[in-house]
């Protein structure tokens, strides 16, 4: 007989949880810098809203607007000839020779994500007096930005949204006094625009992307970094923007190719955009889509709706994703005071040590907001800046940087209950596997597919560097395909879709594994990679800095992860047993993890001294996160070495690095360290600050400059603190920090297609629910004993943890509560 004693006094009905009330950031003045402007997006159009009074600037992007065209084959036909000489040099530890030869295996640089242009609104007033009661905000609960102020006795408001259902940007301008709106509206672009009008209330802007844009860090003497024409016969894509003004009264006219609105009480601006992009393998010029027809059709369709109808449909479509997850962190100290402080100042106070858990909860949800806003289910993946970029030569080309940054963008997609928005990356991986197959053949004479450090909308897969101009430290890295394939497995692991696994994921994963099988060579009884780099770090050898070596820890960890996933996939599908057996044999011979003299996990095969001991990358901890080969439960000695590595590397770094470190600390079950990293990434960063990473006034991640992966990595880290499932169990509150003693979370996803709600108080679980969407067996790990409303629950102990396992039924929910003690 069991005697149960209930612990705690809070039993929360998760179904009653409402959307967060801390869903806004707000400011008392317009933005003057881009990283003060507020972002909206629908996965196709992105916009940055400055909130000016006399002069409003809305900077625009379109997700498919990139320079260039499909990759060219055989750009470096002799590249494969250098592979064996590189391996020979490395075998002799002639690192200088290996470094020089590696440069000869490079192709061209990736292309760049481009700005669409600017929407400029010039408000005309009766007097030059200053406005008062100025206010601007971004409400992430409905994905709407607003501006309001009073001038000349009139209150003006602007509301901006990027409609997901209608694929248009909408600006609603109102005055509380009839016929008080007088304004001019212009379009502008850096892409050699041609602006025209229909003679009344509509402007069009036709532009064309360059055929080539060099990275901002690559400036060769005598070479124009922007090539507008391509001699090979495929010029850049075309882009069309359509702007229409619809007032309730007053008059709209066209004056010098801008729209003039006079004497209106309300006016709505509708903007659509489309490019001729027609797929990664088609020339966007000669084989492109009809961008003019697409942009015009979107404008015509939206005019059939009232603004209130369009607004309501936009909110419904957005909340379909956003409302799935709720996070509340209790603040009984000064929550009401914090929420009365403008958000830039509030962020500064937080950096000085102010306690503000509701700001932290906002930052978590802001990452989900940005992912929803930057991603359309059938669109392009979020790039290095999501969908927002103002530069013709953006930092790092605003491309797909696949040695961590692109992957980090989608870490919160599955666990954050946004699985559908993972699809653009999964499709991109499928595209990349096609170009990567050619690269594997051309550059390495290998089977399977390979990808390197950078890619773009054209699925570039070769090592970049413009045929020798790139540093192998970052250009020549060979594990892009292997790491990206993890996302295919993770999508299956969270959703259990065997059709996806069989028809889409497994073929691509297998081809990535085939390349790795060919790429590995045997040395001293182990399988190693050669050449090998660890992004983007160096070690000292005989007084020289070295980047190219053999069997870096990251290489081996990624291959270990890939082989494990392919083996498990083969077992699920009950096919390809022969290949799975081969991978098991290879897996057993992979060069193992090594622990160095300081107790750290070595980054290289030998215990070399790092050139930068506090480097932003911690690539050798891949097995801890996002991999699963290092764990305090499964490999405690390696976990201790990973913890030491983390300690030696330090907490400082770029914004995205701090985001990754939240996840490391969470996987090490150190909630207080994870929380420290949250405070690190949320340090206020001035718009022009080039120091350590943090957060800009608009809550964009500061590398610096802006990189969106820090936002997404941090959101994923929050989830790892509250729920982990990578070890085939739902670990409840694995890394809860002391700073979050009470709270609740709703809607997190675990592998096995479980949805989890949790409430906690005094740092311990109180109650929760697990919804099984597939009917899998469920295993719960908890630091306190639980009573579970389920049949046939099996209980065990693992050190300080209670472990429960039970069979679930499909689409059923199971409630549990915590108990103080249990007498068996």
Image: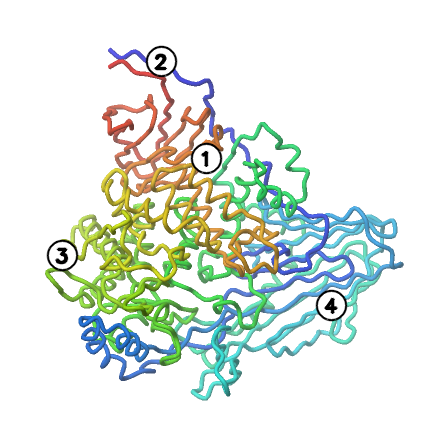
Q: Position of residue 473 (x, y in %)?
A: 35, 68
Say whether disc 3 or disc 4 marks the residue closer to the N-terminus: 4
Which residue lies under the disc numbered 3? 589
Q: Against 212, is 374 above or below?
A: above
Mark closer to the observer (2, 1): 2
Which residue lies under the disc numbered 2? 5
Q: Position of residue 182 (x, y in %)?
A: 82, 61
In this rendering, position of residue 437 left or right of residue 30: left
Q: Residues within 10 Å of mark 4 (few under 14, many from 20)?
A: some
Say whether disc 2 or disc 1 marks the residue closer to the N-terminus: 2
- The local secondary structure at tag 4 comes to loop
Mark closer to the observer (1, 3): 3
- The local secondary structure at tag 3 comes to helix
Which residue lies under the disc numbered 1? 746
Task: From the viewer's side, name the closer residue of 543 and 567.
Answer: 543
Task: Identify which residue is drawn at 68% across, 56% down.
Answer: 31
Question: How far is the residue under mark 1 from the one under mark 3?
Answer: 43 Å
In this rendering, position of residue 344 left or right of residue 81: right
Question: How far is the residue under mark 2 from the one under mark 1?
Answer: 26 Å
Q: Residues within 10 Å of mark 2 (few under 14, many from 20)?
A: few
Q: Against 18, is 262 above or below?
A: below
Which residue lies under the disc numbered 4? 201
Mark closer to the observer (3, 4): 3
The C terminus is located in which quarter?
top left
**Label pair 1/4, CB-CB below 8 angstroms:** no
**Coloration of the structure image:** rainbow
């Amino acid at each position: 007989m069991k005697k149960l004693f209930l612990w705690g006094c809070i039993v929360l009905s998760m179904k009653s949880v409402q959307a967060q009330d801390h869903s806004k950031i707000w400011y008392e003045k317009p933005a003057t810098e881009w990283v003060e402007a507020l972002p909206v997006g629908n996965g196709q159009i992105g916009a940055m809203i400055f909130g000016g009074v006399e002069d409003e600037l809305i900077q625009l992007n379109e997700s498919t607007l990139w320079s260039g065209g499909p990759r060219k084959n055989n750009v470096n036909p002799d590249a494969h000839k250098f592979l064996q000489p590189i391996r020979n040099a490395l075998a002799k530890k002639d690192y200088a020779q290996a470094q020089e030869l590696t440069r000869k295996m490079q192709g061209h640089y990736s292309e760049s994500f481009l700005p669409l242009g600017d929407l400029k609104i010039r408000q005309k007033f009766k007097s030059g007096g200053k406005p008062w009661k100025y206010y601007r905000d971004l409400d992430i609960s409905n994905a709407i930005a607003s501006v309001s102020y009073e001038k000349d006795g009139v209150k003006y408001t602007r509301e901006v949204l990027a409609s997901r259902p209608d694929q248009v940007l909408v600006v609603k301008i109102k005055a509380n006094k009839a016929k008080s709106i007088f304004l001019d509206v212009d379009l502008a672009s850096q892409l050699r625009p041609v602006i025209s009008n229909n003679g009344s209330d509509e402007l069009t802007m036709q532009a064309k992307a360059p055929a080539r844009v060099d990275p901002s860090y690559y400036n060769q003497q005598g070479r124009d970094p922007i090539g507008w024409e391509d001699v090979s016969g495929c010029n850049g894509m075309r882009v069309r923007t359509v702007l229409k003004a619809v007032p309730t009264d007053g008059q709209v006219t066209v004056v010098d190719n801008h729209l003039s609105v006079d004497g209106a009480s309300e006016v709505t601006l509708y903007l659509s955009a489309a490019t001729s992009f027609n797929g990664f393998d088609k020339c966007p010029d000669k084989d492109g889509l009809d961008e003019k027809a697409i942009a015009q059709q979107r404008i015509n369709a939206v005019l059939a709706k009232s603004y209130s109808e369009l607004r309501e449909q936009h909110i419904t479509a957005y909340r379909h994703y956003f409302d799935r997850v709720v996070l509340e962190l209790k603040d009984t100290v000064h929550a009401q005071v914090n929420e009365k402080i403008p958000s830039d100042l509030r962020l500064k106070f937080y950096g000085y040590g102010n306690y503000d858990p509701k700001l932290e909860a906002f930052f978590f949800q802001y990452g989900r907001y940005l992912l929803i806003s930057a991603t359309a289910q059938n669109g392009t993946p979020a790039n290095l800046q999501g969908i927002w970029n103002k530069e013709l030569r953006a930092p790092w080309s605003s491309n797909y940087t696949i040695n961590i940054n692109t992957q980090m963008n989608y870490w919160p997609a599955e666990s954050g209950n946004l699985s559908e928005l993972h699809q653009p990356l999964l499709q991109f991986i499928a595209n990349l596997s096609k170009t990567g197959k050619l690269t594997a053949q051309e550059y390495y004479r290998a089977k399977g597919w390979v990808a390197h450090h950078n890619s773009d909308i054209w699925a570039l897969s070769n090592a970049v560097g413009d045929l020798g101009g790139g540093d192998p430290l970052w250009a020549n890295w060979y594990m892009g395909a292997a790491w990206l394939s993890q996302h295919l497995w993770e999508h299956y692991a969270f959703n259990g879709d065997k059709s996806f696994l069989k028809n889409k994921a497994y073929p691509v994963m297998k081809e990535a594994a085939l390349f790795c099988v060919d790429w590995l060579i045997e040395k001293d009884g182990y399988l190693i990679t050669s050449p090998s780099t660890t992004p983007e770090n160096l070690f000292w050898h005989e007084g020289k800095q070295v980047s190219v070596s053999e069997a870096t820890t990251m290489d081996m960890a990624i291959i270990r992860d890939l082989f494990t996933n392919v083996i498990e996939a083969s077992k699920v599908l009950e096919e390809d047993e022969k290949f799975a057996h081969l991978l098991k044999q290879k897996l057993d011979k992979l060069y193992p993890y090594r622990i160095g003299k300081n107790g750290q996990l070595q980054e290289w095969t030998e215990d070399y001294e790092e050139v930068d001991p506090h480097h932003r990358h911690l690539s050798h901890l891949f097995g801890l996160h996002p991999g699963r080969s290092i764990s305090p439960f499964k490999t405690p000695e390696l976990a201790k070495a990973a913890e030491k590595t983390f300690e030696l590397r330090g907490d400082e770094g770029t914004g995205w690095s701090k985001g990754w470190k939240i996840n490391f600390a969470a996987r090490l079950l150190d909630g207080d360290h994870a929380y420290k990293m949250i405070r690190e990434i949320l340090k206020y960063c001035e718009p022009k600050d080039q120091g350590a990473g943090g957060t800009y006034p608009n809550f964009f991640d500061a590398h610096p400059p802006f990189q969106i992966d820090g936002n997404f990595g941090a959101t994923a880290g929050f989830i790892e603190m509250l729920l982990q499932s990578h070890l085939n169990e739902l670990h409840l509150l694995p890394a809860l920090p002391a700073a979050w003693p009470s709270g609740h979370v709703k809607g997190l996803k675990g592998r096995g297609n479980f949805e989890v709600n949790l409430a906690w108080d005094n740092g311990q679980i109180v109650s929760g629910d697990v919804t099984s969407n597939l009917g899998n067996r469920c295993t719960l790990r908890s630091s306190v004993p639980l009573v579970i409303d389920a049949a046939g629950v099996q209980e065990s102990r693992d050190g300080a943890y209670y472990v429960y396992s039970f069979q679930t039924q499909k689409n059923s929910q199971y409630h549990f509560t915590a108990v103080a003690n249990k007498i068996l």
